[in-house]
Image (spheres, rainbow, N blue to C red):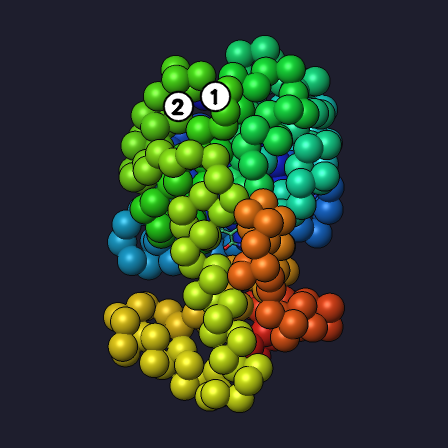
Amino acid sequence: MKNVSVIGAGTMGNGIAHVFAQKGFKVNLIDTQNEAMEKAINTISKNLDRQISKGTITADNKASTLQNITCFTSIELGVKEADLAIEAATENSAVKKTIFSTIDQYAPAACILASNTSSISIAQLASATQRPGKVIGMHFMNPVPVMKLVEIINGAETASEVTETIVTLTKILDKIPCVVKDFPGFIANRILMPMINEAIHALSEGVSDAATIDQIMKLGMAHPMGPLQLADYIGLDVCKNILIIMQEGFNNNKYAPCPLLIQMVDAGKLGIKSGEGFYKY
Ligand SMILES: NC(=O)c1ccc[n+]([C@@H]2O[C@H](COP(=O)([O-])OP(=O)(O)OC[C@H]3O[C@@H](n4cnc5c(N)ncnc54)[C@H](O)[C@@H]3O)[C@@H](O)[C@H]2O)c1
């Protein structure tokens, strides 16, 4: 496996491109927005600088990593030679299904199609393609260059050789694969998002302020980051979308996003990426 196409150059797409390019893969980074692409390359460059200053890579490693990344604005051109295409676009099943169907049309027949989705059914994405056996979930954690876990999700029709290939590939990236079944939110977000949502409920009920809620979870549960700070980091729009997908997927209102979360997203307060969420950046 040599050529990897990453579709979506946002928070996650740039991190995924970073780790593959650093391991010598040729990466095509694809986004419909030129602005997102420019921001992604800047972020990758800054994150590589941080690795240089920590002494984990050299300036030569940085140059070769950046050289391994080519930007595209069209999926048609960007996946033509892909051995693996990883979709990391907006958490919306209609958007993702259109992307999967386009990749399926233009990528080589042997190409594996992975999604970085946090919660959307892999079987549903696979149904938009003619190769459901080659569709799998490859859920990286944020920030991708730092976090070790990759949650690997088998869809109903994912072939066992495809799972084995993705498990091996995850290890080549120096990450740790955990294989799970295709249920809404899988494991990571099924457990994380209700905690974040509950913290937002507590904030909206005035039980305490954001900094105190976060401090309690950091000091009391030894979490490195409080739930509200983490929500800002993930993106409040992403959190809202994941909760809605779990609410619909389980047909259970216990996952319904807190009205305060919905209001903040409507007001454009998306967390770090928009400059304001539960905190100002
Ligand atoms: N943010 C996190 O902490 C996190 C963690 C794990 C997984 N995820 C998942 O990763 C995926 C991406 O999330 P993100 O936080 O990077 O989102 P983001 O909003 O930062 O980036 C999404 C990018 O996708 C692009 N895009 C949208 N439609 C496209 C299309 N048709 N073709 C090409 N590009 C398109 C957008 O222009 C944008 O740049 C989502 O499925 C999300 O659930 C997010």
Asked whether, in this view, residue 141 is left or right of residue 261, the answer is left
Whether residue 48 can be seen here? no
Query: In which quarter of the view is residue 235 placed?
Result: bottom right
Mark 1, mark 2: which one is toward the viewer? 1
Dot 2 corresponds to which residue? Answer: 163
Amino acid at circle 2: Thr
Q: Is residue 110 above or below residue 121?
A: above
Which element carries disc 2, helix, strand or loop? Answer: helix
Work out which quarter of the rendered image holds the C terminus and state it: bottom right
Question: What residue occupies the far front of the structure in this picture?
Answer: 252
Task: Please name whichever residue, 12 or 61, is drawn nearer the observer in this view of the structure.
Answer: 12
Asked whether, in this view, residue 127 is left or right of residue 199, the answer is right
Q: Residue at x 57, y 54 (%)?
A: 252
Of mark 1 and mark 2, the one earlier in the sequence is 1
Q: Residue at x 28, y 50 (%)?
A: 56
Task: Please name whichever residue, 207 or 56, is drawn nearer the observer in this view of the structure.
Answer: 207
Q: Residues within 10 Å of mark 2 (few under 14, many from 20)?
A: many
Residue 107 percent across, percent down from the top left? 63, 18
Which element carries disc 1, helix, strand or loop? Answer: loop
Asked whether, in this view, residue 25 is left or right of residue 102, the answer is left
Amino acid at circle 1: Thr
Q: Residue 90, which numbered label? A: none
Q: Residue at x 57, y 41 (%)?
A: 120
Whether the residues at callouts 1 and 2 have beta carbons within 8 Å, the answer is yes
Task: Please name whichever residue, 77 or 129, is drawn nearer the observer in this view of the structure.
Answer: 129
Dot 1 corresponds to which residue? Answer: 158
Residue 40 percent across, percent down from the top left? 58, 50
Q: Residue at x 47, y 35 (%)?
A: 182
Residue 23 percent across, percent down from the top left? 37, 33
Cβ at disc 2 under 8 Å from ligand 1: no
Query: In which quarter of the view is residue 123 placed?
Result: top right
Work out which quarter of the rendered image holds the N terminus and state it: top left
